Structures are given as C-alpha cells and as structure tokens.
C-alpha cells in the first residue's frame, strides 16, 4: 500500500529484489521458522490518514481539561511556569530533535556545545563543580545520586528525610533493594522541616548518604548547612535534591556543603505533559566525577586547532565498561536539557531571581489570604517558597470537587499519599497567577468550606 | 561556518531576553540564612542574540530531517511531523500529573490504547508504560524477574548475555544486583547453543537476547533456547531494540520470551532528541504481571483509572508519575497512522532496504554473516585495516565529508572493525543508491589514496578531535571570572 512514510514503489521493489537475487520480499524472511511467524494480520484497526489522526487525537485531547483552561494550584513536584516563546522555537529546530546521541562529534557540535552549556548552567545554579548531560527525571536522579554515594563510600545504607517527595523515595527503594542497600526513611519534625534529632539517631558509620529535598515535599525550606554538618560528622555524603527556580533566591547546595546535588528540571520551561518527558539533573564535587552516571560533554581541540566539543570520560559508561559501568543509562533526556538551557539563557540571573521572587511573593500573599478563612490552618511553621500545606476544617475531597466546578484546581490532596491526612491540601502559586486570581481562590475556598461544613 | 561562541561569551551585563509583568502583590522575602549570597552567573543576552546562538548551534548539528542517518541499532527512521503537532495540543501538553481522573480521561485513553497495541504487536500479556528508555525498560524487567524468583523462594545470582549484546544489557543486570556471564556466538552470529547449555543452572535468573540480534541475524532457535531456560526456571528477556525487523510478522510472545522492552524512539518513530527523550515500555507474560510497576491504567464502566493499590507484589516505581507521556502519545499516533495493515509493511520495507544496501556493498567489504540480513547488517573493514591501514573509524569519518551520518562503528564487539548499517524503511531507493555509491567510492579511496580517509573529515565544521585530551584534561563547564574585590 502506498503510505506517506513508506517510499518504495512496486517498481523499486522489483528492481531491488533483482539486485538481491530473491523472488519476493517475503523470502527475505525465510530465516524466521514458519512456526514463529504470526501467520495472521494484526488484530488492530487499519491505518489512518493525517486528517483522521488529527481528528481522533483532537477528540482525545478534548476529553482532557488542561491546566491552561483552568486555574491550577497543583504542584507537588510538577510546576506550572510560563515558558518563554524562544524555548519552543529552539526545540522545534529539527536539526536538534531528529538527531541521535552525538556519537559523531564532527557532525553534532551544536548539540554537544548546548550540552556543555547546560552542564555549566547546572553547576552555576547548584554551586557544584561538575554536571552530567542529564538523567531521566528527578526521582531517577535521586536514585542515581544515592547509588553514587554508596559506590563512593563503600557503604550500603541511605537515610532519606521524609520531606523528599514520596514517589522519589519509592524510586530510590526500587533501585536500592536488589543491591542490598538499606533505605531508612525518617519522619519530619512538626514544623514541616527535617527532624535533625531523629536523623542523627539513624546516621551511623554504615551510612553512605543523607538525602533531603529543598523546598521539601510539603513546601517547607530546610537548613542545608545543619544537614551537611550531620551527614559529614558520620562520614556520609549529603545529597541535596533541589528545585531549580528556587535557586534564584535560595542558597545553592555547593554553598552549604552538599556532595551531590540533583533534582527535576521541569520548572525550567518544560511542559507538564502529564509527567514527562522532563529532565533529571545531577551535579557533584570534582572528586566524585568518575562515579558520575551517564553522558558528559567536554572541550578539546580538533586537528585544525579549533575548540571542539565531545562526549568524554566514557570509561564510566555501559558501552565501554558493560557490567562495570557506573550506570546503565544510554538514551537520556538531552532535548529537555536543551529546553532548560534556553530557559536559563532567556531568564539570565536577573530574570531567574525575578521569577523566584514572584513565586515566593504570590504564594505568601495567597497563604496570608487563606489563613484568614475561618477554620483553615497552616500546620507547618517552617518558612516556605512557592508551595505550602493547608489544613482544612473539612475533608479536602469535597472542597476540591466544588472548586473544580468553579474552574479552580485547588491543590494536591495529601490523602493521595497519606490516608492520615484527609484534610490537608498542598497549594502552589507561581508567577503565572495574578492577584485577582489569588483573591478569587480565597473567596471560592471560603465558600466551598462553608458549603461542605 | 566559523565557530560559535559560548553563550557565556555573548553575555553583557544588563541585557535580557525575557521580561515579566510587574509584581502585583507585596514582595515577600526569605530569612537571610537561607538566601543565596550571589546570583548565579547565567548569561545576559538579548532575545535576538539568544535566537541566533541556538539557531547557529542547530546549524552545526545533523538530524534525520537533513541527512541520511544509517546508524545501526538506532532505527533512525523519519519522525512524522503530525506526531509533534498532536503532542503540542494544549489538551495533552498542559496536563498536570496529579489532576483528578475526571479531567484526564483522554490521556488515560491514550495510555490504555497504547498498552493494547503493544500487547497485540508483541504477543505479551501485560504492558507497563513507565520505563523512560530502553535501558530503564531492561532494568525494570529485571526487577520484575527478581521479584518473580524471590516469590518462589529462589535467589538465582546470574544473568546471561550474548557476546553480541548491547552494553546496556550487562549494565542493567549488574545494576539489578546480578553477576553477568557472557555466552558465545557461533560463526553464523547465533547464540552458541552448546555454550549456553554449559552455562545453564538453577543459578541463572535470565538470558537477555536481542532478536534479530545485533549482527542482523534472526535467532531461529529462540524457542529451543526458551525451553532450555524454562527447564531451570530462568526467564527469557527480549531486547526490543530491533523490533522494527519483525513488527506485525512475528512476535516475541510467540517465541517463548517472558519479558521485553520496546524502544518507542526506534521502532515507533518518536524523535531521538539528540540523545533523548525516549520511552521504553515493557511487556511481560501473565506469570510476571503481578510484579509490574504501579500505577496501572485500567478501564471500567465509569471510564479510565490509574490504580495504585491492590498490587501487593509490584516492584514499585522506577520513576515518578507515569512514564514519558509525550513520547507514549507520539508512539501511538505513529501506530495509528500505519495501522495493523501498515506495520508489517514497515518491517518488510526495513528488511528489503537493508538487504538491498548489503547487496550493493558486499563485494567491497567483508560481510561476516553472509549476504542476507534482517533490518540491519554488519560489515567489517578488517581487510582494509590489514591491507591499507585504514580503520572502520576512518570510513566513518570519510562518510561525514559526503554529508552522511556514519554507521555505528565498533559495535557489536564480536566483529572487528565493525560498520553496522541500518537504513530503515523510510529511505527511498535513490537515497540508498547514492549512499552505496559514495561508500563504494570511499572503499576505492581506501586502496588508492588511504590518507584521504585518515585525514577525514575535512568538510565538517571541525576536524577529527583529540578525544584523549578531553579525558586527560577534563573541561566540563564554564567557569566565571572571580568577582572583583569589593
Ligand atoms: C540493542 C540495544 N539494546 C538496548 C538499547 C538501549 O536503549 P536506550 O538507549 O533507549 O536506553 C539500545 C540503544 O542504543 C540498543 O541498540
């Protein structure tokens, strides 16, 4: 059948078979024993024309209610920010998006240079010495960070502050279990921040890493310096899982003594896209560079004396070291690393600080409004960035449903992660919200609570 | 094209490429101890400078849209534009992963349908869309394999991989806590059954196999291999990187394979993005279903649901949320464009193109596995290396001078001076003819003027690189000048 993606004509096929010396295309499959062949058509619908595809997938897209058609206060690891127009346009350059991993550097200097610029920006943002070219996503970056700490210290235990996103912790446990690495999760203090005393009780000489998230899952800010002191006093590494926009204002991991910094790059201009594709970042101190997972781009010279970029330190990687590699990662998330690079270039130091300040200010303005709604509490005393926990006087489910009816996604219900928190709502406000929208949120919330009570 | 400055070298304090509305609420501040001392030294550029910089970088890059890309094992087929348009629809691109189920029914339908398509194509009973790329699919399936054995109270320690296997196979096995043992290939490129037999024991958890394998040969004894493995309760893993060769014509699930991954960024046309993103869903047989990652997507009378609970034997999560949804979506758009009737034509076209190209090249190079192949073939430049002192790498670099991406070189490891060529079905006969003529010409140069190969490339923006220096003196980031003393 002629198909837009399949160029061979009957005439081509005949000429090609003649050159090969076979009577028919199907005889090229003779090496597949007959009893292993399907022997029937696939039980799947027939092909669609482009117009039919547009119609069918347009229907499915229409069955969703995206955050762009609502007012969303959802966060919990996935943040709605405005992506500068330039990001989409750069990513739409098909010289970038239809290329493979840059194995032939002479042809792919553009992507290699972009990766090197990405690595530089991750280092500048986190205050660390070296970054890789990307990992799959934030949870994977945390898991690889923990494995890296175990390999570097020769120890087999990691302590996770429960302020780490619950799904991130699940990923660490999945990766750690088969290697016999013990994962200890330590509850937060009542303030919402890490419980230093409880963490200290679990840290010992067998511990490879202490890992925490900042801002943490509940929105609260942690004291990186105190956590670094704790980890280092037992010879463990400090793994800081950080949110990149907040680093426009917050002290970077390198400044408070983290050994490995990691996190999710989605807030840097990457569409929510129902959870992926996003980009995990990882950066570390110089001394750990040869334990780093994944691709790394470096600078060298070519044979004409020019500056040139190339994938380097590859003796860490699976295609050279096979089972002795530092990780199994091959395909990573390069295009999304490019998105983050363009976003950070567009914002610059001033723009990043402004976005962070707007997020901080809008969230605090909203927190001030909702804390005056009768019966509503802010259960955590610790300072926060752009996200905070609300405790409602009634169960969150009904309130969220009612607010959804008004076009507002009120927040992420913490009952989703912890049945013991049926009234808690995690609320996030970024630079995308206007004062009028924040005012309306508080009004609609007050009404929804009154109706539910 | 002259070299492009670093974006940091274009920076000038006071410029900007993006602005924000004025803050319309009171400005909040952070406690001093938590604040950053100094702003990160990100570049400060105008919007036009930014656009030119990244446009120049794109012009210093090569993709499928600009050039033929016969990179073996990577299935560099055309990436249809409509896939990109669908993924950019606000109804998909702007979905938050924690929206309530009633607001994401279309997205869940995409996932449910994709699972159905992958199950029918593979002959597997259950699918998980969660893994992010092929290698994470391998690892996820090995986690599943481990959980399966543990449930039976067994702890086999070994994973077997053929010597032709991709590096991610042994790396994934090691990451899953297994010892890796390598099985030899015979002189036809098949897994050596005698060597396999000698290595089998109850201590073997799994064999990871690619079929057609990485030398482009179909493992005709796959059923017998499955039976040998199952006799010691070991599992057979199918690395789906080469599914393009058999899609719609033969199914791993019918060959006795227990688990597998798909590379949607190979077989199902999602763009490779210069090194990702990909998507590496896995499929398993019924006995492994209970161990799959959560959440699972299900359908009932009220609609589609993501279910987290009720899977006590699940391995948990290998990543946050539900997988690389934007790529899963593109993969389904592609499958629906081809349909159940078109997918076998993809495999036929891929295999015909590869055999045709092999026919055009086989008199110039050693073809260690004969003059027939599946969707890709491996040539060796051993003779040229011996007689003319030019290597597979030299051939690869010379091809760049003629505007072609090079084949995969030095993989698989069992072929010396390997050139692994995969044209894919989306290339026309004219493209293959032109490529073959150039490569035949280079083979002639190898004999007559070998220094042209050794000096290549000369037509690219940079020449051959000093990779040793890159590793000896790592320069991995830009370092700002220290701030002037206060
Ligand atoms: C045979 C084979 N197996 C596994 C992989 C790994 O897939 P991915 O790069 O998506 O992790 C590849 C891709 O390069 C491959 O060619």
Image (cartoon, coloured by chain):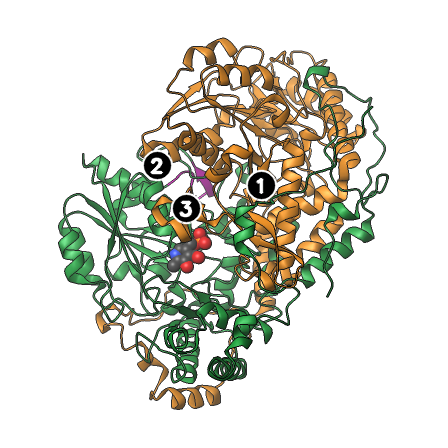
Q: Quadrant of residue A366?
A: top right
The one nearer the camera, A432 or B184, is B184
Which circle, 1 or 3, is nearer the viewer? 3
Dominant SS in magenta: strand
The kind of secondary structure element at disc 3 is: loop
Which residue has dot 2 on it? B315
Which circle, 3 or 2, is nearer the viewer? 3
A28 on left or right of A345: left
The image's mark for residue B115 is none
Mark 3 neighbour class, 10 Å CA radius: few under 14, some 14 to 19, many 20 or more: many
Which residue has dot 3 on it? A328
Regarding ligand 1, which quadrant of the image does it lie in? bottom left
Q: What residue is rendered at 53% in x and 76% in y? A: B451
The chain drawn green is chain what?
B
The chain drawn orange is chain what?
A
**Residues rendered magenta in the picture:** B293-307
How many labels sit on residues?
3
């Amino acid at each position: 059948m002629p198909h837009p993606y399949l160029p061979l004509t009957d005439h081509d096929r005949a000429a090609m078979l003649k050159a090969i010396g076979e009577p028919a295309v199907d005889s090229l499959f003779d090496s597949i024993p007959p009893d292993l062949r399907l022997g029937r058509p696939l039980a799947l619908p027939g092909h669609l024309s482009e117009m039919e595809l547009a119609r069918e997938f347009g229907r499915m897209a229409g069955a969703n209610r995206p955050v762009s058609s609502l007012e969303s206060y959802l966060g919990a690891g996935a943040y709605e920010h405005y992506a500068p127009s330039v990001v989409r346009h750069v990513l739409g350059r098909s010289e970038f998006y239809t290329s493979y991993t840059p194995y032939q550097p002479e042809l792919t200097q553009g992507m290699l240079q972009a990766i090197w610029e990405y690595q530089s920006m991750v280092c500048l943002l986190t205050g660390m010495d070296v970054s890789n070219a990307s990992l799959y996503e934030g949870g994977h970056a945390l898991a690889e960070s923990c494995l890296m700490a175990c390999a570097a210290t020769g120890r087999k235990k990691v302590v996770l502050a429960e302020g780490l996103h619950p799904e991130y912790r699940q990923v660490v446990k999945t990766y750690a279990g088969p290697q016999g690495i013990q994962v200890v999760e330590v509850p937060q203090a009542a303030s919402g921040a890490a419980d230093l005393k409880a963490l200290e009780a679990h840290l010992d000489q067998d511990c490879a890493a202490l890992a925490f998230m900042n801002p943490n899952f509940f929105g609260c800010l942690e004291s990186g310096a105190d956590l670094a002191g704790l980890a280092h006093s037992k010879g463990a590494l400090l793994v800081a899982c950080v949110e990149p926009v907040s680093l426009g204002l917050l002290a970077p991991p390198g400044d408070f003594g983290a050994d490995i910094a990691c996190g999710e790059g989605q807030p840097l201009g990457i569409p929510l896209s129902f959870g992926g594709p996003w980009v995990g970042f990882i950066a570390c101190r110089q001394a750990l560079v040869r334990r780093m997972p994944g691709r790394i781009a470096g600078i060298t010279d070519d044979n004409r004396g020019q500056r040139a970029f190339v994938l380097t330190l590859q003796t860490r990687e699976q295609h050279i070291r096979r089972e002795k590699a530092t990780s199994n990662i091959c395909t990573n998330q390069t295009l999304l690393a490019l998105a983050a690079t363009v976003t950070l270039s567009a914002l610059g130091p001033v723009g990043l600080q402004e976005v962070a300040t707007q997020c901080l200010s809008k969230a605090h303005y909203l927190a001030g409004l909702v804390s005056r709604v009768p019966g509503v509490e802010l259960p955590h005393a610790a300072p926060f960035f752009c996200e905070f926990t609300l405790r409602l006087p009634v169960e969150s489910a009904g309130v969220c449903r009612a607010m959804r009816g008004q076009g507002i996604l009120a927040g992420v219900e913490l009952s989703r992660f912890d049945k013991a928190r049926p009234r808690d709502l995690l609320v996030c406000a970024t630079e995308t919200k206007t004062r009028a929208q924040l005012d309306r949120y508080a009004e609609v919330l007050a009404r929804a609570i009154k109706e539910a009570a | 094209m002259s070299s492009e400055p670093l974006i940091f070298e274009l920076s000038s304090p006071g410029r900007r490429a993006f602005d924000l509305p004025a803050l319309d609420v009171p400005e909040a501040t952070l406690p001093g101890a938590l604040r950053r001392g100094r702003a990160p030294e990100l570049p400060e550029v105008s919007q036009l400078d930014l656009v030119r910089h990244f446009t120049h970088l794109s012009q210093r890059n090569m993709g499928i849209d600009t050039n033929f890309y016969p990179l073996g094992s990577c299935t560099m087929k055309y990436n249809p534009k409509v896939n990109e348009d669908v993924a950019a629809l606000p109804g998909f691109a702007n979905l938050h992963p924690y929206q309530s189920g009633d607001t994401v029914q279309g997205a869940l339908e995409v996932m449910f349908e994709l699972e159905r398509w992958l199950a029918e194509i593979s002959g597997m009973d259950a699918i998980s869309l969660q893994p992010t790329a092929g290698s994470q699919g391998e690892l996820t399936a090995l986690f599943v394999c481990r959980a399966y054995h543990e449930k039976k109270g067994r702890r086999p320690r070994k994973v077997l991989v053929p010597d032709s296997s991709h590096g991610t196979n042994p790396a994934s096995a090691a990451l899953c806590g297994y010892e890796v043992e390598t099985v030899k290939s015979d002189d036809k490129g098949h897994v050596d059954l005698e060597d396999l037999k000698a290595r089998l024991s109850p201590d073997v958890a799994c064999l990871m196999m690619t079929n057609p394998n990485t030398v482009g040969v179909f493992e005709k004894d796959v059923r017998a291999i499955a039976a040998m493995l199952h006799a010691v309760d070991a599992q057979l893993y199918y690395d789906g990187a080469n599914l393009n060769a058999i899609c719609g014509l033969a199914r791993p699930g019918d060959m006795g394979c227990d688990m597998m991954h798909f590379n949607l960024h190979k077989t199902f046309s999602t763009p490779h993005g210069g090194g990702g993103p990909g998507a590496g869903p896995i499929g398993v047989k019924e006995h492994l279903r209970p161990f799959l990652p959560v959440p699972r997507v299900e359908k009932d009378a009220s609609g589609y649901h993501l279910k987290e609970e009720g899977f006590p034997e699940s391995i948990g999560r290998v990543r946050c949320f539900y997988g690389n949804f934007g790529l899963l979506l593109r993969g389904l758009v592609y499958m629906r464009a081809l349909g159940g009737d078109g997918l076998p034509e993809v495999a036929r076209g891929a295999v015909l193109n590869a055999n045709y190209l092999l026919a055009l090249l086989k008199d110039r190079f050693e073809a260690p596995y004969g003059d027939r192949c599946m969707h890709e073939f491996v040539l060796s430049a051993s003779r040229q290396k011996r007689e003319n002192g030019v290597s597979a790498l030299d051939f690869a670099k010379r091809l760049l001078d003629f505007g072609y991406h090079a084949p995969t070189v030095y993989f698989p490891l069992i072929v010396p001076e390997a050139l692994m060529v995969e044209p894919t079905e989306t290339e026309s006969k004219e493209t293959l003819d032109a490529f073959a003529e150039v490569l035949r010409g280079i083979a002639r140069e190898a004999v007559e003027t070998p220094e042209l190969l050794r000096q290549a490339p000369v037509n690219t923006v940079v020449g051959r690189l000093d990779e040793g220096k890159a590793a000896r003196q790592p320069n991995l980031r830009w370092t700002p000048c220290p701030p002037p003393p206060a």
